[in-house]
Amino acid sequence: MSLIVQKFGGTSVADVEKIRAAARKAIRAQRQGHRVVMVVSAMGKNTDTLLDLASQVGDNPPAREMDMLLSTGEQVSVALVAMAIHELGAKATSLTGGQIGMKTDNSYSKARIQSISTERIERLLDQGNIVVAAGFQGIDDDLNITTLGRGGSDTTAVALAAVLGADACEIYTDVDGVYTTDPRKLPEARRVEVISYDEMLELASLGAGVMHSRSIEFAKKFGVPIHVRSSFSDTEGTMIVAEAESTTQPVSGAAMTADEARVTVLGVPDVPGKSLQIFSAIAARKIAVDMVVQNVGKDGRADISFTVPRGELKSTLQALDQVIAAVGAEGVTHDDQVSKVSVVGLNMATQTNVASRMFRALSDAGVNIQMITTSEIKISTLVPKDQAANALRAVHEAFQLHHRPDDAKSWKQIKADRGATDVETLVNRLRADALEALTLTGITLTKDQARVTLHGVPDRPGIAADVFEMIGEAKIFVDMIVQGYDGEDGSTSVSLTVEKKDLKRAMEVAESIRAKHGLRDIQGADNIAKVTVSGIGLRSHTHVATLLFDRLATDQINVEMINTSELQVNAVIDAAKAVEATEGLRKTFAESLR
Ligand code: ASP
Ligand code: MG
């Protein structure tokens, strides 16, 4: 008999009528012949109310008591949902996190799932019950109640679906699916039928608040298909699965985060370990750093720029104040009137000209790009805040995101195409007691890379577009791109990596751009290599990047360029040190490699 997990978020159980509606959905599924497990969040804004109560009692509530308090929200709703099901004539049993055997570590308020025992759920299902499980909570080895972090009920649901081998995991919420961009920011946004785990993870880290990131990581590890849909209508929503909607469309979604700040640390001595010092100081304050760009050094010094959410700027500057002298940097500048505009797509990893299309669209809209970073499946640009809405519209239009791609497939077709071949998951390689542990899939070395750097790129629209169009016309595949501040005169520098065999031609293109736009200087280097750490959820396990930098710094290996995504952390280093670096990293991450 098939088993489905149905998760109802806070808005879907906000009042008694909605609780009844949720109960009816579960009963209907049961009558259609499924075994049904519901996972339920706290009613409406109940978790916020509890948080507020705690803050009225005192400023420093013990973490353990906080989790004890917050877990009650879900306990209220599971009991009420079970009662509603009884009232409607079906059988239901509610269970707390402890009662479903949800074992976690003991980091209160952000506990990670270690194992789940399924016997009790199976037994209750065998007896004809709908099982109503409390989301967001678990217990540690000492039976203390823990919570998984805000929004954690999604993770409970996907984890249960994984260990129970559910046929479907339905997430009922107040939106009817995943859109190409936030429809509140851009009405042309289109609901997609299918989106891949990796795209969803990237979009989530850009602020697309549809689902808890950790739940997507979990789904990816175990190959759980997720169906995000509205609790207030019967329309099909969006399937989050391994595959993308189309196999050709380079971009699947766009995102804009309006309130960002750029920070530049000027004149950092270009020796190993300096970035580590800077970013550890910021990480100690739990501030999420994005778009890290290190300009290629001159006179033994480099400028390091990065972005933080605007609300964290003050704290970031304080953190820097304390380390600047120790680092030996020359100063810090910042700009708090900037926004980040990004595009995400699984297929861009294998296509050329995606970046140039984006940059051209921005240039045509009169938008000046201040910084660029790329990863395998994402391109992010930093733009002036007052141009951000325009920028988002231009990019959405350029990639025709409002149109369903011609080769788009429904989930049904994708499943049929899979046939008997299962998607590759990591399930079999995981230990049973490490459900949510960091999972790395490889440490690899890409040799024979080369870098081209353009210095003194004037800070005005259109130049990035020119550069990458011309490189594209020359049929040169560009891997990493970074643009950052050059320091002194407000100009920027753009670095890109290509294969070593293409360096000569790339330099010719660079030279013609230098002549055309009056750039200060171009530089090429062919003695570089790229080391890559790949895995699942590299952003939610924030220590991966830190460990990588730590290892390279310990081995006295200088990092020239870096990029990070949900899937990979990449560092461009001196080719002569590449093998040593790879071996060092294999040792550092031995525990997590599977
Ligand atoms: N009730 C918790 C929260 O509001 C968990 C959840 O809704 O997923 O964060
Ligand atoms: Mg919620």
Image (cartoon, rainbow, N blue to C red):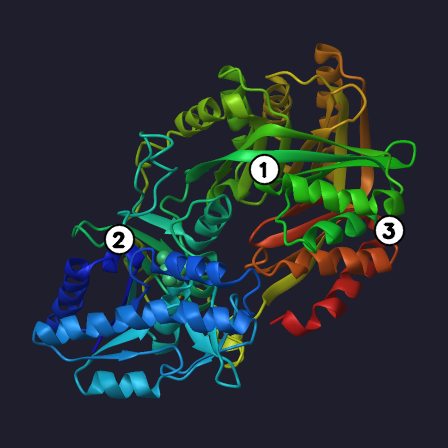
Q: x%, y% of residue 237?
A: 26, 50
Circle 2 crowding by C-alpha within 10 Å: few under 14, some 14–19, many from 20: many
Observer-nearest residue: 463 or 277? 277
Count of numbered marks: 3
Amino acid type indicated by mark 2: Arg
Are dots 3 and 2 in contact, CB under 8 Å? Answer: no
Q: CA distance from mark 3 to mark 1?
A: 39 Å
x then y, percent, for residue 117: 40, 84
Amino acid type for the residue under numbered disc 1: Arg
Nearer to us: label 2 or label 1: 1
Tell me the residue at 52%/70% (across/down): 111
Position of 102 compared to 539: left or right?
A: left
Give me the disc on residue 229: 2
| Element type where label 2 sits in the image | strand
Question: Which mark is nearer the camera, 3 or 1?
Answer: 1
Q: Is residue 94 above or below residue 393?
A: below
Q: Secondary structure at mark 3?
A: helix
Q: Is residue 101 left or right of residue 278?
A: left
Closest to the observer: 371 or 17? 17
Q: Quadrant of residue 443?
A: bottom right
**Can you name the residue that lies furthest to the left here?**
89
Query: Toward the viewer: 443 or 104?
Result: 104
Out of 471 and 261, give the one closest to the viewer. 261
In the image, is residue 67 above or below residue 453? below
As drawn, the label of residue 576 is: 3
Q: Viewed as shown, does residue 285 lie left or right of 277? A: left
| Residue 146 in view of the camera | yes
Please report whichever mark, 2 or 1, sits nearer to the chain's N-terminal start: 2
Q: What secondary structure is marked by label 1? A: helix
Rendering coords of residue 113 (x, y %): 49, 73
Name the residue carrying label 1: 310
